[in-house]
Image: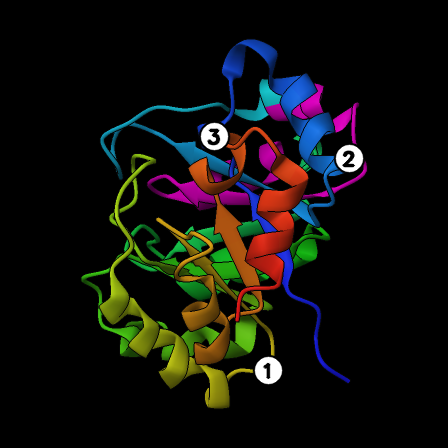
Amino acid sequence: MMKKTRIAPSILSADFAKLGEEIRDVEKAGCDQIHVDVMDGHFVPNLTLGPPIIKSLRKITDLVFDVHLMIENPLKYLEEYRKAGADWMTVHVEACENIAETLETIKKLGAKPGISLRPGTPVEKIEPFLKYVELILVMSVEPGFGGQSFQEEQLEKIKYLRPRFNGLISVDGGVTAQNAGSCLRAGADILVAGTAIFAQNDRKAAIQSLRGAP
């Protein structure tokens, strides 16, 4: 049986003035989960939402909250994000003092543990930790800001990881209907998309075009 491609709208590209409406809209349009980017202004040069907003949004949907923690020393904050409503928590290999402990803590809290890496980080850096995770997030742009162009060379990381990892592989950054097919052929299971969904008038069609990309 073919695995269903999962579509995860990134709310970094949503209208923050009506975030609840935006999430309801993409849920109605057929998305599978919500990608929540958390930035601390240190690991990446930007600041975004924290646990109070996630807690508020948790009340309006039962969709999986896939929380991407682009923060330094995430171990200190895992319990707070889990209590707020994070279902999956992905941390960066470059940001953790003790990666194994961090990933094990995510699992103990009852969330799905994931690991990510910057475009410039060799894929071999995460290999020792594959046994701890259920999700790998391959960044196809430099983390920190939305609207960047997709880096084609990052597909090689997905191709490398696919035969070595039985869990979910997600790709995030500059994903569009034009490059979604390449991501899926490389072995990705989840497409994280921001402007490719939220900037479109017909979001149902946008999601369908991503999911059905040749």
Estimate the x, y position of residue 59 in percent, counting from the top left: 79, 23
N-terminal-most mark, 1 or 2: 2
Residue bearing mark 3: 199
N-terminal-most mark, 3 or 1: 1
Q: Mark 3 or mark 1: which is in front?
A: 3
Residue 106 visible within the image: no
Label 3 element class: loop
Query: At label 1, which amino acid type do we have?
Result: Asn
Q: Residue at horizontal 60%, vertical 18%?
A: 19
Residue that protrudes farthest toward the left in the picture: 120
Q: Residues within 10 Å of mark 2 (few under 14, many from 20)?
A: few
Task: From this view, report whether residue 43 is shown above or below residue 114.
Answer: above
Residue that protrudes farthest toward the top in the picture: 17
The span picked out in magenta is 54-81
The part of the image, by quadrant, that contains residue 158 is: bottom left
| Between 160 and 45, the one nearer to me in the picture | 160
Residue bearing mark 1: 166
N-terminal-most mark, 2 or 3: 2
Residue bearing mark 2: 28
Query: At label 2, which amino acid type do we have?
Result: Lys
